[in-house]
Amino acid sequence: MAEKAQAVERETVMVDGVALTPQWSRMFEPRPITGYDLSVLDEVTAIPGAESLGWCYQCGKCTAVCPVDTVGDFSPRKVFRRTQLGTPLLDSPDLWLCTTCSNCLRVCPKEVNMIQIMPAVREQAVADGQAPQELLSAFENTARYGNPLGEPARKRADWVKQAGVPVPIMSQHPDPVDVLWFVECYPAYHPRGQEASVALARILNALGVDFGILGREEKCSGDSQRMAGEAGLFEMLAEHNIKTLSQYMFNEVLVTDPHAYNALLHEYPKFGGEWPTRHYTQFLAPRIGDMAFRRELPWRVTFHDPCYLGRHNGEYEAPRQLLQAIPGLELVEMGRCRENAYCCGGGGGGMWMDSFTAEFTSMRLSEKRVLEAIEYGAEVLAVTCPYEVSRFEDAVKSTGNTGRLQVMDIAELLAKSMALVD
Ligand code: SF4
Ligand code: SF4
């Protein structure tokens, strides 16, 4: 067998007229990776679901797209590095800053998956009672009342009184319907959510859709609670809703909330509840031809893609088709849109942690987004997730832009143009 040539170290070697010395290959000290005490990182990656945090190789792509890093100091890369250096993630504010928007996963070459890491590690923190108090209150409300707002179940269908059109409640009219509308908590209880629900009920009536709602029998879908670390509560809610839905005959589920959409599409089937499910924009877009538009809305409108409709579930077109169908409306896109859309800050439990998050960020994500919409000259910020109306309206006020930007659900814009609401 031929002997391997031995490496010879020369004093200098000329390459393309440049004198190289061995020093060139010693410019960087070998990084003493194995010199770290990795026990803290190992503890985190040993949690089922959190393994991929250990796959990070520090390329930094996630930092460029993480919405939280634009107002703070946070990204998967930073979480990995701090954990590698010995900061226990379970005690760190980092554990609660991620909104599970999924933009990092879109660009990460190593598939470090915060959508799995965050709920897994948070679940352990919640079990140890280490979650922010305001989040624990939202969990408690959900467990006690079936919604994070702490409203009584008997009021869940009160908004129907304002609808001015028939909104059948399944328990009172248990005949089969074509469409079962899963309304969700904010559209049922929040005053601005109720306005969007009234608008959607009128549109469905105008289109002659045969539908019904669950009313007080419906509970929160629980998807955000799951992402915030309350898997047990989520399971309880899923089982309740699946049992309730299973009592009735319908052809498909219509949801107002992208978080409920996500739960019904991907999580409820794991518990035996599987139905054809569409977000209301997906349900309405093919019916544009049946909509009688009576008013022009001569407004410059921009659209905020909800993370759980867009990035999580790939729907970018239906909301835009609806907006573009409204006569007079001019749709302008913000730079961060579609796959790279910014986040309102409400996902992954962020909806209930604004005070906590404020300590670690320079402004709310919703405020940043509102300022962006204004930069693009928008008069209306169109939304299609019930978390967003209240978040962005608060942000319009807190950034001193009252009167400069309106926040409207797409259902409200459609109903307005169809002369179904004032
Ligand atoms: S994109 Fe992925 S691999 Fe790169 S730094 Fe972020 S988490 Fe690490
Ligand atoms: S999911 Fe979103 S908020 Fe969370 S780390 Fe990734 S980019 Fe940042």
Image (cartoon, rainbow, N blue to C red):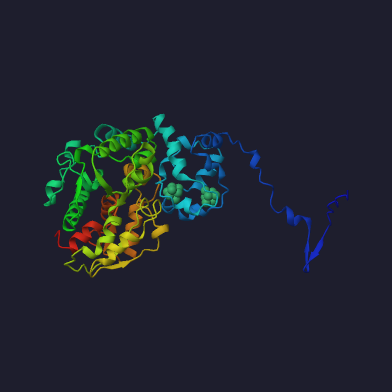
Name the residue at 46% across, 55% down.
Answer: 65
Looking at the image, residue 98 sits to the left or right of residue 251; the answer is right
Residue lying farthest top?
A: 128
Residue 348 image-quadrant placement: top left
Name the residue at 28% across, 40% down.
Answer: 220
Residue 147 visible? The answer is no
Looking at the rendered image, the quarter that the C terminus falls into is: bottom left
Residue 177 visible? The answer is yes
Number of numbered markers: 0
Residue 268 image-quadrant placement: top left
Name the residue at 11% across, 52% down.
Answer: 164
Front residue of 245/323: it is 245
Looking at the image, residue 254 sits to the left or right of residue 78; the answer is left
Residue 98 image-quadrant placement: top left
Classify 176 as above or below 288.
Answer: above
Front residue of 116/169: it is 169
The x and y percentages for residue 44 are 51, 36
